[in-house]
Image (cartoon, helix red, strand yellow):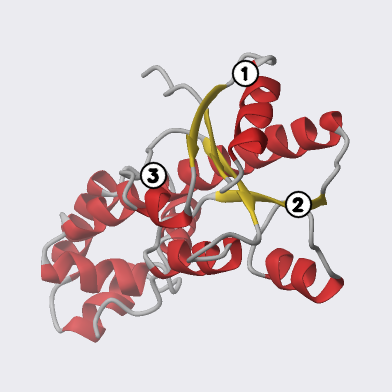
Amino acid sequence: MTEAEPIVFIVDDDESVRKALERLVTSVGLKVETFSSANDFLKHDPYDGPACLVLDIRMPGLSGLDLQAELAKAKRPLSIVFITGHGNIPMSVQAIKAGAVDFLEKPFDEQALLDAVHLAIQKDRLAKEKLAELREIQERVESLTPREREVFALVVTGMLNKQIAFELGVSGGTIKVHRARVMQKMKAESLADLVRLAEKAGIRDMKD
């Protein structure tokens, strides 16, 4: 499956800054979309491919930090590079703590911005790959029957088939069949693989 083309979203209320940033980013072969306000960007449909957001801090209406918070609230994770002409240390600390990749003060070095953009796109790519993997694992878990989920929850604790059979009040042969189906549905090749899948899905006790 071919990966979607990376996109750099630019949000700044200053048209001259937007145009300058667009020229700079497109000069290295990256696709760009620009927005004049945070609200305009929020109306834009989420992008599934790798992307980053170059975001001004101070704008009329929602600020850059406000937009960062709104995206987090809406569960639309996106790697952000902040730019500002009015930066201060507490503001930059707040942005970085909330997950921003970088915080650049105007006038910034063009190469520093491009480096930050490339890093942000890579971080976004990895985050989306991890999210897609997690969704796939969760779909596998949802394909299990209630009994298979019980067996799965006990298998990943390290219990043997006979121990699980005693715990659930069924025969060892029945557990062997359920265990094989769990391995097949979860696409696990070993117990270690099954444990890894359970950990990635954040599974602690699926009997609850």
Question: Which residue is located at x 66 percent, y 41 percent?
Answer: 120
Question: Which residue is located at x 13 percent, y 64 percent?
Answer: 174
Q: Is mark 1 on a helix, strand or loop?
A: helix
Q: Mark 2 points at which residue?
A: 102
How many numbered circles are shown?
3
Disc nearer the start of the sequence (1/3): 1
Q: Is the residue marked by circle 1 packed among few (<14), some (14-19), or many (20+) residues within 10 Å?
A: few
Q: Is the residue marked by circle 2 packed among few (<14), some (14-19), or many (20+) residues within 10 Å?
A: many
Q: What element carries label 3?
A: helix
Q: Is the residue marked by circle 3 packed among few (<14), some (14-19), or many (20+) residues within 10 Å?
A: few
Q: What residue type is labelled 3?
A: Ala
- Disc number lying in front (1 or 3): 1
Label 2, label 1: how far apart the Cα atoms are: 20 Å
- Disc number lying in front (2 or 3): 2
Q: Name the residue under label 3.
A: 132
Q: Where is residue 83 in the image (x, y as percent from the top left)?
A: 72, 50
Label 1, label 3: how far apart the Cα atoms are: 28 Å
Residue closer to the observer: 87 or 153? 87
Question: Which residue is located at x 24 percent, y 81 percent?
Answer: 207
Q: Where is residue 61 in the image (x, y as percent from the top left)?
A: 48, 66
Q: Where is residue 72 in the image (x, y as percent from the top left)?
A: 47, 66
Q: Mark 1 points at which residue?
A: 26
Q: Is mark 2 on a helix, strand or loop?
A: strand
Disc nearer the start of the sequence (2/1): 1
Q: Which amino acid does label 1 sit on?
A: Thr
Q: Up-down: is 203 above or below 107? A: below
Please give left or right for residue 88 compared with residue 150 in the image: right
**Contact, CB < 8 Å: mark 1 with mark 3?**
no
